Image (tube, helix red, strand yellow):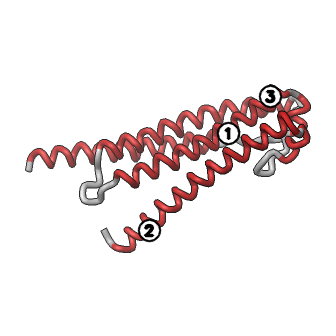
């Protein structure tokens, strides 16, 4: 592998660590803001975190407010977990023998997590539309379709990677 590629991969490794830590901080921020708005300062729902104004939803229903915040936290956790899985791929990837069953399993796991998030995202979009019709909340966007597309692409890459691992293992046995 060229030196430039090695540097790019090292930079990507650092970027994924930064993303992982950033998502963890966002999760904490949303949870703390939610708890403050729930128990200490109800007006805190007006600027929950990340520019979210869920005061009208909180006024409409505490349960729906908790549900929407739970969905927000879920998607942040999914993003953090996917970044963590990519970090694990960097730890296990050996460029002398790049295809391994371990890395293929991690890539497959990322596709499964993205698929689950896509399905939850589609459900969250329907839930959000229902809340909008009730007049409880303004438009909320959920990344359902994006996660489904990502799941399909990563699943395809995982299958190719698994086939490469099988061929590499077969070649190691025949030599």
Which quadrant of the view contains residue 137? top right
Q: Is residue 160 visible?
A: no
- Seen at 45% across and 45% down, the residue is 154
User: What is the crowding at mark 3: few (fewer than 14 residues within 10 Å), some, or many (at least 20)?
Assistant: some
Residue of label 2:
8
Q: CA distance from mark 2 to mark 1?
A: 31 Å
Residue of label 1:
73
Residue 40 vs residue 88: left or right?
right
Q: Earlier in the sequence, mark 2 or mark 1?
A: 2
- Seen at 70% across and 34% down, the residue is 70
- Seen at 53% across and 40% down, the residue is 114
Q: Decide: is 62 above or below 84.
A: above
- Residue 64 image label: 3
- Residue 101 image label: none
Q: CA distance from mark 3 to mark 2?
A: 44 Å
| Residue 156 x/y as whole percent | 41, 43
Q: Earlier in the sequence, mark 3 or mark 1?
A: 3
Residue 145 vs residue 132: left or right?
left
Q: Decide: is 10 above or below 54.
A: below
Q: What is the quadrant of the N terminus in the image?
A: bottom left
Viewer-side residue, 165 vs 159: 165
Q: Nearer the viewer, mark 2 or mark 1?
A: 1
Element assignment for label 3: helix
Residue 6 vs residue 173: left or right?
right
Q: CA distance from mark 3 to mark 1?
A: 14 Å
């Amino acid at each position: 592998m060229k030196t430039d590629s090695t540097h790019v991969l090292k930079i990507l490794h650092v970027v994924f660590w930064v993303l992982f830590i950033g998502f963890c901080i966002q999760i904490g921020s949303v949870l703390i803001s939610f708890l403050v708005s729930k128990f200490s300062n109800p007006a805190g729902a007006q600027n929950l975190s990340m520019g979210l104004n869920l005061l009208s939803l909180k006024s409409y229903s505490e349960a729906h407010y908790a549900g929407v915040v739970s969905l927000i936290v879920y998607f942040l956790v999914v993003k953090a977990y996917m970044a963590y899985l990519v970090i694990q791929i960097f730890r296990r990837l050996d460029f002398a023998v790049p295809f391994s069953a371990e890395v293929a399993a991690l890539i497959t796991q990322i596709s499964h997590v993205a698929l689950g998030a896509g399905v939850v995202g589609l459900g969250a979009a329907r839930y959000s539309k229902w809340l909008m019709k009730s007049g409880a909340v303004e438009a909320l966007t959920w990344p359902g379709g994006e996660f489904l597309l990502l799941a399909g692409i990563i699943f395809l890459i995982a299958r190719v990677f698994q086939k490469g691992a099988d061929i590499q293992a077969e070649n190691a046995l025949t030599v």
